[in-house]
Image (spheres, helix red, strand yellow):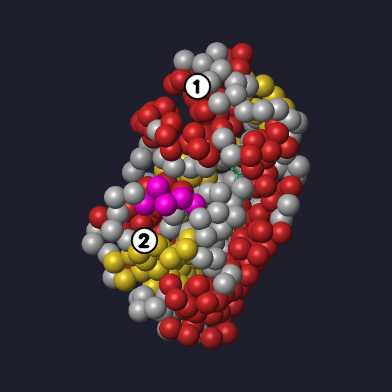
Amino acid sequence: MRILVCGGAGFIGSAFVHQRVAAGDDVRVLDALTYAGREENLDGLDVDLVIGRIEDPGAVEQAAADVEAIVNFAAETHVDRSILDAQAFVTTNAVGTFTLLEEARRRGVRYVQVSTDEVYGSIDDGAFTEQHPLEPSSPYSASKAGADLMVLAAHHTYGQDVVIARGSNCYGPRQFPEKLIPIMVLNAIHGGPLPVYGDGQQVRTWLHVDDFASGIHAVLEHGAAGQAYNVGGAKEKVNLDVVSRIVDLTDASPSQVKHVEDRLGHDRRYALDSSKLRQLAGWAPRVDFDEGGLESTVHWYRDHEWWWRPLVETAEYRAYYRRVYDRDPDF
Ligand code: TYD
């Protein structure tokens, strides 16, 4: 299959590209190579890379020539950045998705939107099914929910062949050091403080990036047009427990754990019911967070300083870190 993977040089997108190339698909990547997208993430792969933005119709038209499906990973994804400035979230996530949908409609090809559990908002007990109304609470999740609604409207209005995959929190190799796990791992290894927001009792469900990638492929192959599918992890964890486990795995000191000011509007708990996709395609996560998933991720960051070092030495990264954590990074 010839697939256009938008955002294929990012964290989740590149995991998907690695899987699809290994499976024999013909992959073209459209990526703006912003701070979180990197050519290095595609090292060793035989893929065409078109550098451009998904909200640029010219770049999209060029990249989409002859493809049979478009899968969109391209997004601004970090809640803390959206709290500081949401402009890029609206442009990339909402306008970019619209631009890709228009191209998919012109070409008559299947469109897969990669989305998130955060579009449903926070839930105290139980888990969200796909029927739950969208109640996003951060500028980030609002931009993703807006994009999901545009995707569903394209089906309702024009009969477009679209599907949505909503994932839970991902972890694994090549995640930019701004999300919980890589931030904690790098600080733990380098003796820095581990900044836990608020009481640290928030709950996230962790999904290995390779499992999300295989779930997205199941949605691409088997999903019914106009439908959304939850792709949830199996391990629900309190943030403080994740941080303690990282302390153990890195031989850091528990005294490095520091409670800091809470995130504005911090969602308490996310949880997905993924039975719709399990029943449709037999998909299930394979990597266990406690049995090797987190540990192999810690090892990956230890062994790949060449990958993360250039990222954390940019002026942009250091300025970002200072704004969020009120200090310089220790790594
Ligand atoms: P994050 O990785 O940003 O994902 P999301 O907000 O999309 O779930 O954060 C995961 C959880 O970890 C969330 O409850 C916020 C918390 N967190 C911290 O406590 N400290 C941090 O430095 C970061 C980045 C996140």
Image position of 186 with respect to 252: above or below: below
Decide if residue 98 is on the left or right side of residue 65: right
Report helix, strand or loop for mark 2.
helix
Provide residue 43's location: percent of width, then percent of height. Answer: 34, 49
How far is disc 1 from disc 2 in space, using C-alphas?
34 Å
Instruction: Tell me residue 228's x, y (percent).
Output: 50, 65
Picture quarter with the N terminus: bottom left
- Magenta stretch: give its range: 37-42
Find out whether residue 40 is within the magenta segment.
yes
N-term mark: 1 or 2 = 1
Frontmost residue, 6 versus 148: 6
Which image quadrant: the C terminus? top right
Element type at marker 1? helix
By secondary structure, the bulk of the magenta-drawn segment is best described as helix
- Residue drawn 68% across the image and 38% down it: 319
- Marks 1/2 in contact by CB < 8 Å: the verdict is no
Q: Amino acid at mark 1?
A: Ile
Near mark 2 (Cα within 10 A), the count class, few <14, some 14-19 or many ≥20, is some
Instruction: Report which residue position mark 1 lands on.
Output: 189
> Residue 217 bears which disc, if any?
2
Q: How many marks?
A: 2
Q: Nearer the viewer, residue 196 or 43?
A: 43
Give the image location of residue 129, x and y in percent. Answer: 54, 57
Which amino acid lies under the numbered mark 2 shown in the image of this protein?
His
Camera sees residue 223: no
Residue sitting nearer the eye, 264 or 66: 66
Measured as percent of width and height from the top left, residue 301 is found at 43, 31
